[in-house]
């Protein structure tokens, strides 16, 4: 499994770009996403940009990576990194709600 790291383009020459993210600056292969303007956010896998993303999406991925790092140290204080999830009951996605309703209506055990 690969984890995409959000990085911001600093300068781009077309095939390669200098990007910053997660506290480091690296030269990134841009062949899959093409030339990008400085300030553009990309998800980087193994030093190759694979997807152009919004600043908001980049921030969410960065927060998830921060949470992973904290969890690996044993911390459970992660709610501030997931404000959209904290303080509410978990919900099934619509396709699973639909499957549960079908199972329940047939009388299948849950």
Image (cartoon, rainbow, N blue to C red):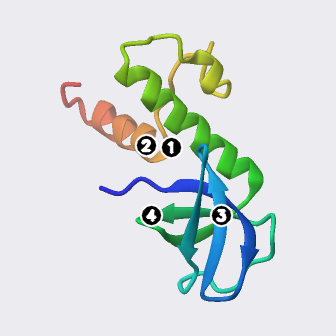
- Relative height, residue 102 to residue 25 (above, below): above
Disc 3 to disc 2, C-alpha distance: 43 Å
| Residue drawn at 50 percent across, 23 percent down | 90
The residue at 50%/43% (across/down) is 94
Quadrant the C terminus occupies: top left
Q: Would you say the residues marked 2 and 1 are in contact, meaning their CB atoms lie under 8 Å apart?
A: yes
Crowd rating for badge 3 (residues with CA inside 10 Å; few <14, some 14–19, many 20+): many
Residue to which mark 3 is pinned? 19
**Which is more N-terminal, label 2 or label 3?**
3
Total numbered labels: 4
Q: What residue is rendered at 43% in x and 12% in y?
A: 75
Q: Secondary structure at mark 4?
A: strand
CA–CA distance between discs 1 and 3? Answer: 38 Å
* Quarter of the rendering containing residue 100: top left
Q: Compared with residue 100, is residue 109 higher up or lower down, i.e. above or below? A: above
Q: Which residue is mark 2?
A: 98
Which numbered disc, 4 or 3, marks the residue closer to the eye? 3
User: Given this view, does label 2 or label 1 mark the residue nearer the observer?
Assistant: 1
Question: The N terminus lies in which quarter of the figure?
Answer: bottom left
Of 79 and 62, the residue lying toward us: 62
Provide the secondary structure element on which disc 2 rests: helix
The answer to which of marks 4 and 1 sits earlier in the sequence is 4
Residue 55 percent coordinates (x, y): 76, 53
Residue that mark 4 sits on: 45
Q: Residues within 10 Å of mark 4 (few under 14, many from 20)?
A: some
> In the rendered structure, are the residues bearing label 4 and label 3 in contact, judged by CB atoms less than 8 Å apart?
no
- Residue 14 pos. (x, y %): 67, 88
Report the mark closest to the observer, 3 or 2.
3
Other residues around mark 1 within 10 Å, as few (<14) / some (14–19) / many (≥20): few
The residue carrying mark 1 is: 94
């Amino acid at each position: 499994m690969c984890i995409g790291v959000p990085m911001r383009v600093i300068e781009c020459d077309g095939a390669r770009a200098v990007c910053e993210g997660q506290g480091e600056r690296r030269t990134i292969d841009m062949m899959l996403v093409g030339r990008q303007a400085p300030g553009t956010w990309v998800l980087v896998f193994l030093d190759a940009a694979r997807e152009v993303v919004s600043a908001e999406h980049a921030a969410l991925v960065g927060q998830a990576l921060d949470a992973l790092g904290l969890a690996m140290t044993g911390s459970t204080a992660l709610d501030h990194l997931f404000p959209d999830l904290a303080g509410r009951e978990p919900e099934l996605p619509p396709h699973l709600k639909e499957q549960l309703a079908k199972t329940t209506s047939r009388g299948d055990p849950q």
